[in-house]
Image: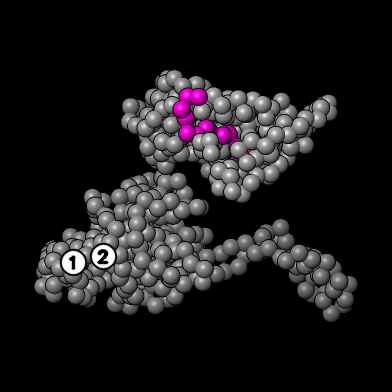
Amino acid sequence: MKIKTGIKALGLSATLLAGTTLGAVVIAPAVSQTAAEEPITIEQPFGAPISFADLIDRVSPAVVSVNVVSETEFERPPGMEEFFEFFRNRPEFDDYFRDRENGDDDEPETRESRSLGSGFFISADGLIVTNNHVVRDATEIQVTLEDGRELDCELVGTDERTDLAVLRVKDPGTYPFVEFETQAELRRGDWVVALGNPFGFGGTATAGIISADGRQLTGGGAYTDFIQIDAAINRGNSGGPTFDLQGNVIGVNTAIISPTGGSVGIGFAIPADLAKDITDRLIQDGKVTRGWLGVSIQNFNEDMAAALGRDGETGALVAQVVKDSPAAKAGFKRNDVILKIDGKPMEDSTQVTRTVGGLIAGTTHDFEILRGGKEQILKVTVDELPDNVSDLPTMDGDSEPPEEAEPETGSAEILGMSLSTLDGDARRRLGLERDTNGLLISSVKSSSEAGRLGLASGQAILEVNFQAVSTPEQFEAAIAEARELGREGVLLSVRLNNQTSVVTLPIEED
């Protein structure tokens, strides 16, 4: 078994946690050390794992505990000012209120807090990877090495969207480090090992297998497909590395799913290839600059394609276009389907997001889209992704109340749904412009395909296969047309909570 003096690993943290994985093989005791400025590696053993001890002995010097002091703004509870006023005119409190009034009361009050996480060296000169949420708002950062040394660190850069951060120790020296394995062919069932600082217990090792890869988490960002592992990950593991059986870092522990706050065997790690790319950019520039198109998108899958008679096609469906964005200037419209970017086919919305994020601001690119059943090319000059992108207005616009009352309309029962024409009240509630057509869902049978799909009372159907519908009769005609064409489903543009999404509704007759 051969080992180098650096360690390939990713970091663990104190609030969110991620797991690590190892390949299914035996670890033999024979190891060898190479030059001090090379990463630690281990020749992969054969057979079922008997012990992970030799692997852990070799890589653990590169893993650190991250201790953070931070300052956050402190907001007084509601009613505190009234509480102070009650005592203001009492002589025994004069000195307190005089000091309070002479001070700078406009300055926000802050509170010091301490947190723990994990991390690991990725270079001999002291660069460390951890999670962004571990060091957020930090005023002091210190790491504790396996030998007990405590070293002050400076922040090199952070990336909130992938939850990664890079630190540098202030003391010059040569440190054991690990490397990212960016070419790993991960399989479910491969062994992995996680190291970190759970609940402040530094140097803790756990082992398990890769449970799944390509996981997308709600709130986890559109730039990361997480590795799921069952090695125990707990609070304080965030930012730590997940190793394969050769001592390579295949992931950075980031998050867990747990009803109790402790490990239940569902942990998540940022894949090494993404972590390597982001940390390289942080080391070079201190930040990550991403390209921006200016659209909200969702997956355009094979079921959606089949509903439009485009079997086998995939991509990303444009749900909204941001006003004055690069997409708006290039002519993008809602319901456009992005099929290719610069000739490269897009599989889903995640691939589109990452591809656009990798484009350089100010450069022009070809976007092949599907609109009205026909492909066309839009040339887009991408911009830099703004920080407040979620607050930017879209081209849907704000709703306005109708000037005149609308005539009452009847309702109809179709595919398990009770549908009626949209009225002014429903438009205002759903954030729609006053001239928007559609159908209001007043009830849904739970046993119907619509019920199983999640459609519910209060939602609105704006389009069928991207064609506007304003009466139950138009909806029925669109369903009949799709059946005549041999389609098994139709696309419904559904409005809820000021957002429109597209779902595929099966329409096979009983």
The magenta stretch spans residue 446: no
66 or 237: which is nearer to us?
A: 237
Q: Mark 1 points at which residue?
A: 25
Residue 408 quadrant: top right
Up/down of 61 relative to 466, above or below? below
Specify the segment rendered in magenta. 484-499
| Residue 386 shown left or right of residue 99 in the figure | left
What's under tag 2, amino acid-wise? Trp
Whether residue 19 is visible here, answered yes or no, is yes
Residue on which the image places disc 2: 191
User: Residue 407: x, y in percent?
Assistant: 81, 27
Q: Which residue is drawn at 43% across and 70% down?
A: 264
Q: Are marks 1 and 2 in contact (CB under 8 Å)?
A: yes
**Which residue is located at x 52 percent, y 32 percent?**
490
Give the percent coordinates (x, y) of residue 23. Answer: 23, 62
Tell me the residue at 53%/39% (across/down): 510
Residue at 69 percent of width and 39 percent of height: 418
Q: How far apart are marks 1 and 2 (CA)?
A: 8 Å
Where residue 84 sits, quadrant-wise, is: bottom right
10 w.r.t. 439: above or below: below
Residue 99, position as x, y percentages in the image: 75, 70
| Left or right of 208, for residue 447 | right
Is residue 422 visible in this depiction of the protein?
no
Most foreground residue, 225 or 60: 225
| SS at mark 1 in the image | loop
Query: How many C-alpha atoms fall within 10 Å of the one at disc 1: few (<14), some, or many (≥20)?
Result: many
**Kind of residue indicated by mark 1:** Val
Residue 426 at x, y percent in the picture: 74, 37
Q: How crowded is mark 2: few (under 14 residues within 10 Å), some or many (20 or more)?
A: many
Q: Does the magenta stretch include residue 493?
A: yes
